[in-house]
């Protein structure tokens, strides 16, 4: 009779104790220039990124039966400088095996993953193993607006380009001396040209209604937002310089 009891207990235990899932969490990061990096737990990105940075976090769950329920939690901590002081905050929490998020702030981000699991017919939840974090950084924002260009087709400085770094949103308009709108655009409509140190929005090719404009002074208005919510407002001149003897 005792053997029967032991056998029954063992059968019940097999149904109440879940098989430990195998996990290998990772992050897929896509920068503004569409470059994609995959970083696994325990690793740090080799270089910093620009905002906005699109991220996909995946628990990488393998070798788990349909009878096992896995509970996941992502926690992202942000460390950053503000007003000359180092600050740290809990930036994001999600409870999904896979989740997406767009980062619009600067700083160093540490991604923690924790999980637990149980058999679907059991109330016994088991804490999963400790997982090393993922670390990556996003640069603070910068914007540089030139004051002249020469759209004369010689291949040198033919386009009016605004240099940006970690700029989340960008809107610009260019006017002639009489206040007539020549061209406008934003981060969705303007062509973006990537660079190892940042990138450029190509704002104007120097034409209006299909023809190259005359030499002279034009005006640009820019409203932009950088990583961390920093606002840029620029109202400045653009000197169109076609070359000697050109109108």
Image: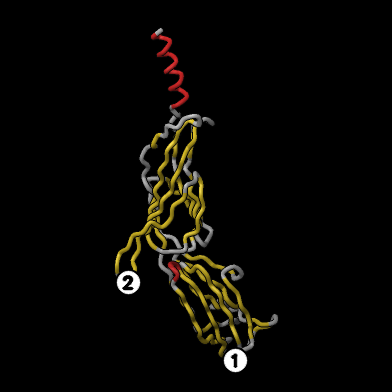
Horizontally, is 165 left or right of 221 in the view?
A: left
Q: Can residue 113 be seen in this view?
A: yes
Q: How far apart are marks 2 and 1 (CA)?
A: 40 Å
Looking at the image, tell me whether mark 2 or mark 1 is earlier in sequence order.
2
Looking at the rendered image, the disc whose residue lies closer to the viewer, 2 or 1, is 2
For label 1, the crowd category at 10 Å Cα-Cα, with few meaning under 14, some 14 to 19 and many 20 or more, is: few
Quarter where residue 90 is shown: bottom left
Q: Residue at x 56, y 75 (%)?
A: 171
Quarter of the figure with the N terminus: top left
Q: Nearer the viewer, residue 94 or 108?
A: 94
Question: In the figure, 12 relative to 175: above or below?
Answer: above
Tag 2–tag 1 contact (CB < 8 Å): no
Against 238, residue 118 (above or below) is above
**Of all residues shown, which one is farthest toward the left?**
85
Pointer 2 local density, CA inside 10 Å: few below 14, some 14–19, many at least 20: few
Report the residue marked by disc 1: 177
Q: Is residue 200 left or right of residue 2?
A: right
Residue furthest top as drawn: 1
Q: Can residue 46 be seen in this view?
A: no
Number of marks in the rendered image: 2
Quadrant housing the C terminus: bottom right
Q: Position of residue 185 (x, y in %)?
A: 60, 74
Q: Nearer the viewer, residue 209 or 81?
A: 81
Which residue in the structure is indicated by mark 2? 83
SS for dot 1: loop
Residue 9 percent coordinates (x, y): 42, 18
Residue 206 quadrant: bottom right
Q: Colour scheme in the image?
A: secondary structure
Give me the residue at 56% from left, 73% from top. Answer: 202
Q: Where is residue 161 in the image (x, y as percent from the top left)?
A: 53, 75
């Amino acid at each position: 009779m005792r053997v029967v009891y032991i056998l029954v207990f063992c059968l019940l235990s097999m149904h109440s104790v879940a098989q430990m899932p195998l996990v290998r969490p990772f992050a897929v990061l896509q920068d503004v220039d569409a470059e994609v990096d995959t970083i696994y737990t325990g690793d740090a990105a080799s270089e910093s990124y620009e905002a906005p940075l699109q991220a996909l976090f995946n628990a990488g769950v393998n070798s788990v039966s349909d009878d096992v329920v896995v509970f996941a939690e992502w926690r992202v901590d942000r460390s950053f400088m503000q007003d000359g002081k180092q600050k740290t905050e809990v930036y994001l929490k999600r409870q999904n095996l896979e989740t997406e998020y767009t980062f619009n702030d600067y700083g160093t981000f540490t991604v923690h993953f924790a999980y637990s699991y149980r058999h679907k017919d059991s109330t016994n939840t088991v804490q999963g193993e400790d997982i090393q974090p993922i670390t990556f950084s996003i640069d603070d924002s910068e914007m540089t607006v030139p004051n002249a260009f020469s759209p004369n087709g010689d291949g040198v400085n033919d386009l009016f380009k605004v240099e940006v770094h970690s700029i989340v949103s960008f809107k610009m308009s260019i006017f002639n001396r009489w206040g007539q709108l020549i061209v406008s655009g934003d981060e969705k409509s303007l062509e973006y040209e990537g660079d190892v140190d940042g990138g450029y929005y190509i704002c104007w090719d120097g034409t209006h209604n299909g023809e190259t404009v005359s030499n002279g002074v034009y005006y640009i208005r820019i409203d932009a937002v950088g990583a961390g919510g920093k606002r840029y407002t620029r109202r400045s001149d653009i000197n169109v310089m076609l070359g000697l003897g050109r109108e």
